[in-house]
Amino acid sequence: MKQGNLILLQRAILNLLIFLLMSNLTFGQSVADLIDAVSKEGILANLRAFSGEDSTTVSGNKVIIQHRVSSKNNDLAAAYLKEQLSSRGLSVNEISFGTNGRNIVAKQLGSVNPANIHIICAHYDSVNDHGADDNASGTVAVLEAARILSQYNFENTIIYALWDEEEIGLKGSKDYAQKASNSNENILSVLNMDMMAYDSDNDHQFDIDVRDIANSYEIRDELINLVSTYNLDLKSKVVDPGTPDSDHFSFWNVGYSAILLGEAWSVNDITPGYHTANDRISLINMDYYFEMVKLSVGYIASNGILKSSSIPELLDTSKVIIFPNPSSNSLNIDLGVSIKGNVSIINIAGIKVQLAKVDGQYIQLEIGDLLSGTYYIKIDNEEGTSSTFEFSKN
Ligand SMILES: [Zn+2]
C-alpha cells in the first residue's frame, strides 16, 4: 500500500471513529438510560405532595392535597396533575364523564406510527385522606414516566392517563375504554398501576395480574423480561386470572391488552392502611417503590420505541399551524418552513388514506371525503421524514 493511500485510510478510520463517538454522544439514549433517569428523590417528593404530607403549589398557590375523594371534590388533585403534565410540554386533556368525574390524559404523539397507542395509567382518586399507596404511588409513577419520556422522540404514541372515580366503580377508565373501543382506537397495551409501594417483608415481590385477553400475555412476558434484562431488584409473581378490581379491567372488558402492576396481593403483603387515613408515606417501602417505578418506565419506554436517529427530521412539528382544526372540508397547513415532498394523511387505524404533494411552506388539503375522526399527517422526501401531527375531521 502506498503512503498516500495509507494516510487516506487513516483519515477515513479517524472520521469513522469521530462519527461513532458523536452519534453515541448525541443519539445514544437507550431504554437503560431512561430507566436510570428515574429519580428516587423526585418520586419521594411527589409522593409526599400528592398524599398531603407536604404542601405544594397549584396555580401559584400554596396548598395541601389532604385527600382525593371524588365525592368530596378532588379538583385540587386534578389541577395538580394537569399542571405537572403540562409543565413537560405535553398536550393535556381534562375529559369529563358522568356528573363530576374527570380523567386527566396527556398524549405524546408517535412520530412514525401515531396510530399505535400504549397507555401507562393509574387512578388518582382515593377513599380517604392521604392515600399514599392507594394510589398516589401509581399516579406518581405515571408522572415520573411523563417527566422522563417527554424529553425523547418515540415512534409510537404514548398516553399518560390518570383516572377518576376508580374507587366507586372504575368509572373513569370505563368511560375512556368504551369510547376508545367505539372509535376503534388501536390501543396496543395498557399498563395499569394501583398500589405499588408497600412491601413489609422486603422480599421485593410484586404481582402481575393478567388474563388471556388480546395480547395481555405479551405484556406479562415483557415485564418479566425487563426485570432480568435491566437487573431490577424485583421478583415477579403472575396472577391469572387477574383481579377485576382496578382500571385494567375496563380495558379487558372491551377486548384490549392490559395488565395490573402492583404490590403482592397474591401473598397478602398489602398495606395495612388500605382505604383508611393511615395509608401514609410512613408505611411506604421506598427501595421497593423505586424499583417498581423503574420497571414501569422501562416498559413504556421500550414499547414506545425510541425513534432512530438515522432518519433525519424534516421539520419542527411544534411550529406547524393547522387551521381550521377541526375541519370539515379544507385543511390549511403552515409548515413553518418550505419543503418539497409528499404529504400523507393516516387514519386512526394507521392506514394511509390520502396522498398529496407539497412544494413550499403552505398546504391546502381537501378532506371532505374523509369520515369524521382523528387523523395524522406526515411529510417525507428523499432527505428524511417529518414527525407526525394531528387533526380532526368533523
Ligand atoms: Zn386503588
Image (tube, rainbow, N blue to C red):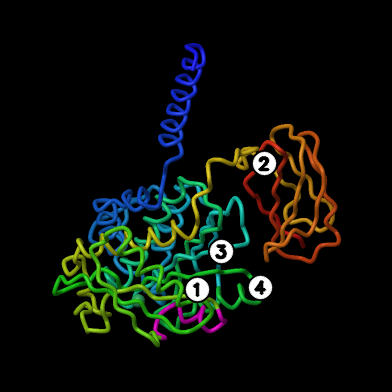
Distance (Cα) linking label 1 and label 2: 33 Å
Distance (Cα) linking label 3 and label 1: 24 Å
**Residue displayed at 61% across by 56% down:** 113
Mark 4 lies on a secondary structure that is loop
Residue 61 x %, y %: 36, 50
Mark 3 lies on a secondary structure that is strand
Q: Which residue is mark 1?
A: 101
Q: Which residue is mark 3?
A: 117
Distance (Cα) linking label 4 and label 1: 23 Å
Instruction: Check the image and name the residue furthest to the top.
Output: 3
Distance (Cα) linking label 4 and label 2: 27 Å
Tell me which label, 4 or 3, sits earlier in the chain.
3
**Residue displayed at 15% across by 74% down:** 200
Tell me which label, 1 or 2, sits earlier in the chain.
1
- What's the magenta region? 244-255
**Residue displayed at 23% across by 79% down:** 270
Amino acid at the residue labelled 2: Val
